[in-house]
Each structure stands twice: as C-alpha cells, then as structure tokens.
Image (tube, rainbow, N blue to C red):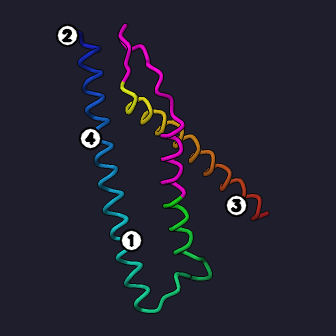
Amino acid sequence: MQNTEILANVMLCLMAVALLVAVATVVWSSAMALRKRRNAFRRGEDGVENGVPVRRIALLTSVGTAVLLLLTFALGSSQSVMTSGKAFTNAFWLRAADMFIFTSAVLMLVAGIAYAVAVWRER
C-alpha cells in the first residue's frame, strides 16, 4: 500500500468521525433548545427579548441550515474522482464533500450580505 492510499484512508476515517461528532452535536443542541423552549413556554414567555424575536430567528436559522445541507447534498455530484491514479467512486462521500463545500460557500455569502446590509443601514 502506498503512502497516498494510507493518507486517503486516514482522511476518510477522520471525515466520518467529524460527521458523527457533528450529527451528535446537532441532536444534543436541538434537544437542549427544545427543552429550553418548552420551559419558557410554560413560564409564559413569548420569545421576544428587547424587541428582537429571538425564538423566530433561532428557528429560521436552524431550519434554514438543515434545508441548505439537505439541498446541497441532493444536488451534489457523485461523479468519480481520480486520486492517486485510481477512481474514487463512493457516491455518498462524494456528495457529502460537495455538501460541505457548497454549504460553507453559501453561508459565507449570506454572512457577507448580512454584514453589508448592517453597515449600510447604520449610515
């Protein structure tokens, strides 16, 4: 086995671990947020703090990110890639790589636009 093949296998394993940690974090964070929301609802809070609809913003951010991840995974390419002279054909990981790349790019674009709008509104 060549060093490049070993490195590719290590990178794939690390990517799988990162994916599992990310999914576990999302599940845990969602459970805690739902628990907090349920407790706030019982106390009669409306989810608005200092005139900012915090609950609505959190919900739209979570749902929007999940939809974006699913959409970019569905639209990701599963065309094989040549690595170390061999074709890599695992469709799931090819789509997952596209998902992370395109989701990151879209979220950075959205953050840049939000920053520009905030600066423009201050003037």
Q: Nearer the viewer, mark 3 or mark 2?
A: 2
Q: Please name the amino acid that badge 4 sits on.
A: Val
Rendered location of residue 21, percent (x, y): 29, 48
Q: Quadrant of the C terminus?
A: bottom right
Q: CA distance from mark 2 to mark 4?
A: 23 Å
SS class of the residue under badge 2? loop
Rendered location of residue 25, percent (x, y): 32, 56
Q: Nearer the viewer, mark 4 or mark 3?
A: 4
Q: Quadrant of the N terminus?
A: top left
x 48%, y 88%: residue: 45
Q: Which residue is most to the top?
A: 85
Instruction: Point out the stretch of residues depicted in magenta.
Output: 64-89
Disc 2 + disc 4, Cβ < 8 Å: no
Q: CA distance from mark 4 to mark 3?
A: 37 Å
x 23%, y 18%: residue: 6
N-term-proximal mark, 4 vs 1 = 4
Residue bearing the label numbered 4: 17
Q: Please name the amino acid that badge 2 sits on.
A: Met
Disc 1 + disc 3, Cβ < 8 Å: no
N-term-proximal mark, 2 vs 4 = 2
Disc 4 + disc 3, Cβ < 8 Å: no
Residue bearing the label numbered 1: 33
N-term-proximal mark, 4 vs 3 = 4
Q: Nearer the viewer, mark 1 or mark 3?
A: 1
Q: CA distance from mark 3 to mark 2?
A: 54 Å
Name the mark on residue 118: 3
Question: Does residue 47 show up magenta in the picture?
Answer: no
Q: Please name the amino acid that badge 1 sits on.
A: Ala
**Dot 3: within a 10 Å radius of its alpha carbon, few (fewer than 14), some, or many (20 or more) residues?**
few
